[in-house]
Image: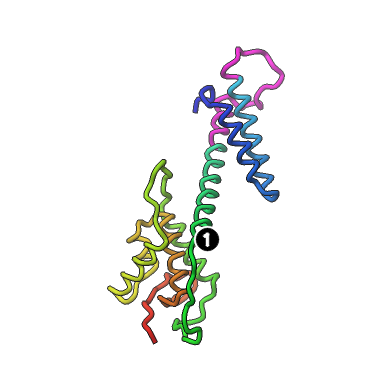
Amino acid sequence: MDVATVPLAAVAQQYLDYVRMMSAIEVEIAAEYLVIAATLVFLKSKALLPAVPSEFAEEPGETPEEVEERLRRRLIAYSKYREFGDELRERQAEAGSFFYRDSGDPTGEVIQRFDIHPEKLTRAFLAMLTAARPQKRTIARERMSLLASMDYIVRRLKESGDILFSDLCRELGMTREAVIVTFLAILELIARRRVRFEQVEPLADIRLFRRTAA
């Protein structure tokens, strides 16, 4: 990364925009970014201005290249945090656009092998999410629709009768986005009483079954 080519105006504007949307609980992150921005300004000024003896030198044993590399790693970590935050906001906005219909007769029994707690489902989801490969962000990419994923799951259950959560993730791409959307689709289908599920033990894979009309 050549700090002399980094536009400081853009960095400052991004920082101001980011601070405006920060909540009070995230003040540590805002402070962290302020340190990064200040370090970037310092490095760029050194790259653009003639060298002048100064008492404000780098820490003993740390070269300018090492300072720049440390900054680069922190900027990458901050960029990943922003990407993750953007992804969560997009998912939240997408989930808020759905209207849920009545699930039908609430007296019908949900058939499953044993009582499954949300924590166990979450562990199975996290296990698949850890195994999924990260997907690089691009300027334009095809996004996976929650409704399309729900339709795919129902269609696969009509064909085979049952399917594993891990198999669904592999069929839909095995990216982290695919795992997240597939898990949300499964939860929505369970809520609508379109599918039932089994999990033989904690951390085991989730097996889905098509629910038939009573």
Q: Is residue 66 magenta?
A: yes
From the top left corner, tell me how far across and down residue 121 is, in percent. 50, 70
Q: Is residue 147 magenta?
A: no
Determine whether, in the image, residue 174 is placed left or right of residue 39: left
Camera-side residue of 87 and 113: 87
Q: Residue at x 38, y 46 (%)?
A: 141
For label 1, the crowd category at 10 Å Cα-Cα, with few meaning under 14, some 14 to 19 and many 20 or more, is few
Camera-side residue of 61 and 127: 127
Camera-side residue of 151 and 75: 151
Does 19 sit above or below residue 186?
above
Locate the C terminus by quadrant: bottom left
Q: Residue at x 57, y 19 (%)?
A: 47
Determine whether, in the image, residue 214 is placed left or right of residue 59: left
Q: Residue at x 37, y 50 (%)?
A: 142
Determine whether, in the image, residue 94 is placed left or right of residue 19: left
Q: Residue furthest left?
A: 159
Disc 1 residue type?
Answer: Gly
From the top left corner, tell me how far across and down residue 103 is, in percent. 47, 77
Q: Residue at x 27, y 73 (%)?
A: 159
Q: Looking at the image, what colour scheme do you see?
A: rainbow
Q: Which residue is mark 1?
A: 96
Count of numbered circles in the view: 1
Query: What range is drawn magenta here?
Result: 46-73
From the top left corner, tell me how far across and down residue 185 is, in percent. 43, 66
